[in-house]
Amino acid sequence: MATADNDRAETGTGTAHGRPVRVRRATLDDVPALVRMRALMLADMGMATGDDRAPWRTASAQWFAERMPRPDEFAAFLVDDAELGVVSCAVGACDAHAPSPAGPSGLQGHVSNVSTDPRRRRLGHARACLDALLTWFEQETRVAVVNLNATGDGAGLYESFGFAPPRHPSLQLRMGGRPSV
């Protein structure tokens, strides 16, 4: 894990590029910021996100709000900026799977919503949020493996934390697109 301080139950401070980075755990009050950061991430991935009234945003806000009260299953870490508000985040959730020898609890972690406002990129904010999130997975959950989907821009960050391709190929089927057999 990165070398940020780990007193992150509620807040923590680390350094990135020689500058202090203050990371805090998100609360219900941060749901609108998490949706805004998700929209930014999706737009950066080339997805049309619509305006603030787009139905997916309401559904996303509900999804975050429902999970926020489950601190043993869900966490989001943020970096605030005095001028811009929330400028970076990383979100994690525990997913239940059948137990195995490699994962006796059956829990797997999933990282999502790693995003930084373009005006504050390359300052170590995403790294600090991801470090806090991985510390949460390690210290406060029973997950044995953490998964994520990386973009080309984010792959280097994740690899620096030890993420690597899975042993078995990951495949995906979009429902409604199944071929006729």
Image: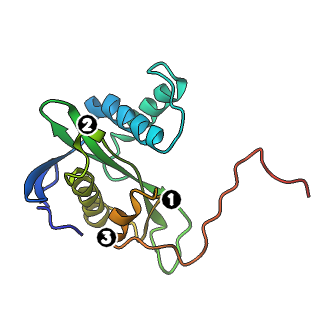
Q: Spatial distance from mark 3 to mark 1, Cα to Cα?
A: 27 Å
Of tags 2 and 3, the one toward the viewer is 3
Amino acid type, callout 3:
Ser
**Badge 2 density bin: few <14, some 14–19, many ≥20, Cα 10 Å:** some
Instruction: Of the two numbered discs 3 and 1 on the same chain, state the one appearing first in sequence.
Output: 1
Residue assigned mark 2:
27
Q: 147 or 95, which lies in front? A: 147
Q: Which residue is mark 1?
A: 96
Quadrant of the drawing holding the C terminus = bottom right
Q: Position of residue 166 (x, y in %)?
A: 52, 73
Q: Residue furthest top?
A: 53
Q: Is residue 31 left or right of residue 1?
A: right
State yes or no: discs 2 and 3 in contact (Cβ < 8 Å). Answer: no
Which x, y percent locates residue 43? 46, 37
Q: Which residue is mark 3?
A: 160
Can residue 160 be seen by looking at this rendering?
A: yes
Q: Between disc 2 and disc 1, whose residue precedes? A: 2
Residue at 19% of width from left, 51% of height from top?
Answer: 123
Is disc 2 placed on a helix, strand or loop? loop
Identify which residue is drawn at 47% across, 79% down.
Answer: 102
- Looking at the rendered structure, the kind of residue marked 1 is Ala
Looking at the rendered image, the disc whose residue lies closer to the viewer, 3 or 1, is 3
Pick the front one: 109 or 85: 85
Can residue 66 be seen here? The reply is no
